[in-house]
Amino acid sequence: MRLGQCHNFHDFRRLARRRLPSPIFDYIDGGADDEVTKRGNSAAFERVDLLPSVLTGVAEVDTSVTIMGQRLALPVYCSPTALQRLFHHRGERAVAAAAAKFGTMFGVSSLGTVSLEELRRQYDTPQCYQFYFHKDRGLNRAMMSRAKEAGVEVMMLTVDSITGGNRERDLRTGFSIPMKLNARGLSQFVMKPKWGIDYVTHEKFALPQLDAHVDMGGGTISIGRYFTEMLDPSMDWDDVARMVAEWGGPFCLKGVMTVADARRAVGIGCAGIVLSNHGGRQLDGSRAPFDQLAEIVDAVGGEIDVMMDSGVQRGTHVLKALATGAKAVGLGRYYLYALAAAGQPGVERALALMQAEIVRDMKLMGARSVADLNRDALRAAHPIGAAARLSAAI
């Protein structure tokens, strides 16, 4: 299978699986516990149908949106994700270049493998910096100061990961950062020699956002231990309010899932929230962000930019989220599989396919702009017994 044969999310996933040693593929692919939430995130979109309008004159469509003061050419962005140079040796460089080509936002993680300064110098497309709240409060302040000095536009604090999710696939292989696998995990690397050659012949793996601050336990720590031992579960709304004030620019909370928390985010001056369950990687059994979107938009959509991620695989998923009231939609595994499959050309192909789907689907919906998408175009997929619930929700 070649890159040119990839036409959707599932094709990129298959190609990534062929290229990556299974411990790394499982790190991207896996979720928490029984992975019920991971599966449910995409299934949530299937419970709502699109209802197109016709004869509206859609020779041209405008896919642009503005979120947290940032103008994006597409209503999707590349969510910040960790450890990208494990998936492909260019990592965040490939993702940033592809995002810039398509005029959309990309994110850099606290666990990123390329410095946010390098990426900010090279690409002028909007950039957000996602960080975790560490027990070391001085580190938190230093991370924000560094991002501000680099010229990052949006600060994005992840609030659903104050401790690590139970990712059993990683436990079985011994996946850790840097690599220190058990026998089962090591055997899988022997079967994928090209990945190993790329890994050892390019620059040494590093976590430049954290290297100067965090002791990785003698050089190796599991992902679960990082979250559990280094992040601060005592973080509260007062802590975040101080950070919002210190940042002084667009500040976003990623991982909000209730109306009450959304209102608190408005109250402390956040510019945006991302409805997210971390792609099903934290609390298994938690609700899908799409299922929560309508009630949160109804509560605070006029006061704060509401976005969502988790489970997005198609342009129609994006349109359903936008019609429900999301300002934009974050992509995670969607571009990570493509990165692992083929580096920058892979991410560019994935974004090109998503762009084409969104444009085509907007035309089929009779929508000339994102603003034309609204809840009149949505219906419950199974109207018997569900129509009233959907009407109440959206």
Image (cartoon, rainbow, N blue to C red):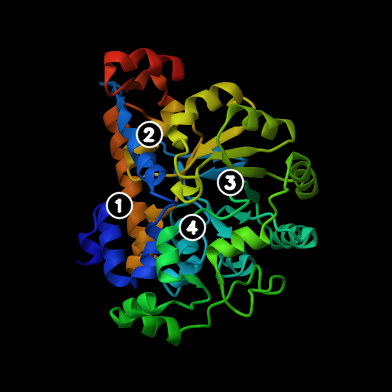
Provide the secondary structure element on which disc 1 rests.
helix
Q: Amino acid at mark 3?
A: Asp
Q: Does the rendering let one see residue 394?
A: no
**Real-space Cα separation, disc 3 to disc 2, in angstroms:** 25 Å
Q: Position of residue 338 (x, y in %)?
A: 35, 61
Decide: is 350 above or below 329.
Answer: below
Q: Amino acid at mark 2?
A: Leu
Q: Residue at x 68, y 44 (%)?
A: 250
**Earlier residue among tags 3 and 2:** 3
Q: Does the rendering let one see residue 354?
A: yes
Pointer 3: what residue? 160
Q: Residues within 10 Å of mark 3 (few under 14, many from 20)?
A: many
**Earlier residue among tags 4 and 2:** 4
**Earlier residue among tags 3 and 4:** 4
Residue 9 got which mark?
A: 1
Q: Residues within 10 Å of mark 1 (few under 14, many from 20)?
A: some
Residue 100 got which mark?
A: 4
Q: Is the residue under label 2 in contact with that under label 4 (CB below 8 Å)?
A: no
Query: How many numbered discs sit on the rendered protein?
Result: 4
